[in-house]
Amino acid sequence: MSEPQLTADAVDYMTDTRPIAEGPAGPGCAKRDPIVVADDVSRRFGGITAVDVEHLEIPRHKITALIGPNGAGKTTLFNLLTGFDTPNSGTWQFEGTNLEGMSSYKVARLGMVRTFQLTKVMGKLTVLENMRLGASAQPGEKLRNALFQGIWGKREKDITAQADVLLAKFKLDTKRGDYAASLSGGQRKLLEMARALMVNPKLVMLDEPMAGVNPALTQSLLDHIKNLKAEGMTVLFVEHDMQMVRHIADWVVVMAEGKVVAEGPPAEVMRDQAVIDAYLGAHHDVDLGAAGGVQELEEVLAADEESVVGTEDAGILSEESVLSEDSEILAVRPPDDEDDDGDGTRERRTGRRAADSPPDVVPGTSHDSRED
Amino acid sequence: MDFGEIFNEAIGEMVSPTTAAYALAALGLAVHFGYSGLLNFGQAGFMAVGSYAFAMSTILLGAPWWIGLLIAIVAASAFALLLGIPTLRLRADYLAIVTIAAAEIIRYVVTTNSLTKVTGSANGLAGFRQDFLRLNPFPPGNYLGYSSPDFFYRFFGWGLVIIFGLGVWLLMRSPWGRVLKGIREDELAVRSLGKNVYAYKMQSLVIGGGFGALAGLVFTLPRDVVQPANYGTELTFFLWTCLLLGGMSTVLGPVIGAMLFWVVLSLTQNILFGLIGVGALPWLNPSQAGQLRYILVGVALMLLMIFRPQGVFGNKKELAFS
């Protein structure tokens, strides 16, 4: 597998091509370097088994997507792993620390920080105060120190500086003094993510970071998430937006009815017939909005004798061909080149698409309108 | 009708020890509700615990004033812990239910006849301030129209209000206060950031309850008598009225709210009495007038909520988002 050299300052984690799994990918497979290991975690609500995960490992320094139909138990699993809910059975470790029975705030202090599906910002605190609230190890948060600014003043300055850097990165610096409640839904998502980063987490767990966010903002959120990996963090996110999953995830875990039903690199998982049947649906990948997109796609596949034209898989194959071509062409782009032309451009830089793309697709024939 | 006299009396009410007690207790409610989002509907219970603890330790144990004060604070803190341990992990409403019930339990227990020797039953306890009055630094004389002990009660009460008001202000601008405000806004989010929400809520409950106990002392010392009838549920709701009048998440709000509450009560009472005296209100007798003034305070509160819902000192911007 050849990995194109993408950027000059690319960090190890971005170009790391070592296999994620030890052995073949499959539900519950062992990872080379897991950060979270869960065993037999189950949660029942009355007669309903919301989560019943036999074994799950989350790879360190990777972006893992957790997908599955509504009610599959994704958010419940999030709650269980972070101590916001108590499982009926099971054990799970974060970096070797057993988290069973640990309260949620202690889990967060270990460096496992989550966001919420329904964004939670402190509306009547300013954006800056929201950020400061996230910072850990603040002496001023102890009651006995609170009255003495001399004790916590310095740390307060430090975290304000840290907050300002993050706010600038998330383009919220102009909103610094505004009440968080005055932000739009998308800005709140950004604030929540930025606030989680104030904790200096090792593992960031994002529950539907893209829900209700407009396409332009999606693009910048995608970048932020990829940057987290570059900075050495591990990301686990729940998402229904398959474009996003395909673009940024290194690994995909599919849940259905509380169980992990499939695992693997996104391209492979999305070809999995069971996943398509249970979740993605046929033709999930065809961009019917793009002019001539469908037609072009079919032409390409018709020319390929090994293709599966007419089956549900067609869309994926087309997508991969597009990506593999792009990543070869665009691999030499400078890293700071901002492309804001919306969806579908960022993945050019990751490069790993090229490696993952199926060999049976001829590149270059389906560079369609959706890229421009 | 002598308007000079009416205004004088209103000003007198404004700085009375009772007003100081209301201000201090409402300040405790501001810590609870305004800053931490804790619904305490039993602040009268905290005041009762404080004043009974002081009176009982002085009368029954012969303790000096400072031991009595210490016992009052410890008792109120224990009361707060007792209420907080089972409820603070639950939703906010549970604390409200438990506090309102607990305050009533306290009142009924001290009224019990079989405890007459300890609590004095409905008559309460009297004669516990002698040791406290030895603190009075003011020699006999006339201070702004008050006798030396009267002036001392006001000095003591408002001194506490100023000290603790300043304390609350300092606390709430610290990172500790920020966590409390965060909890008020969204408890789960604060937990997800690694803060022990339960401990913070408990600290807030104890601090606000301690303010209640001190307010009980400020309230009861000038009377030198503590009676269960003074600590009914309506006291709690008067305190809430003060808090809402002034503005919830402010330090000055509850203080000014308490002053406003008593000024309005005094003005309406005296104006009504004056009008009855000159025969302008033949359909009203003085005892009805006493009830009517609470109706007028209620109307004033409603008008305030309609036209200035954030209270006198509240921040309009904060309210825009609630």
Image (spheres, coloured by chain):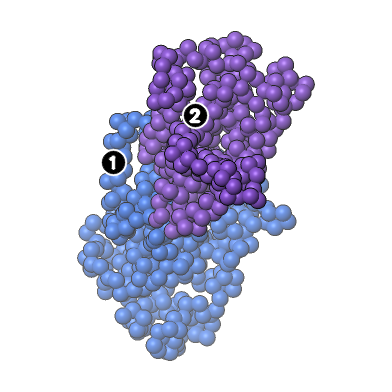
What chain does badge 2 belong to? B
Residues marked 1 and 2 touching at CB (< 8 Å)? no
The residue lying toward the viewer, choosing from A65 and B192, is: B192
Residue located beneath label 2 in the image: B17
Q: Colour of chain A?
A: blue
Residue B249 position in % (x across, y down) = 44, 45
Residue at point 49%, 53% (across, down): B304
- Amino acid at pointer 2: Pro
- Amino acid at pointer 1: Asp
In-image side of B87 versus B159 (left or right):
right
Residue A156 position in % (x across, y down) = 31, 39
Q: Colour of chain B?
A: purple
| Picture quadrant of residue B105 | top right
Residue located beneath label 1 in the image: A158
In-image side of B30 versus A15 (left or right):
right
The residue lying toward the viewer, choosing from B294 and A254, is: B294
| Picture quadrant of residue B135 | top left
The residue lying toward the viewer, choosing from A198 and B42, is: B42
Mark number for residue A360?
none
Residue at point 41%, 34% (across, down): B165
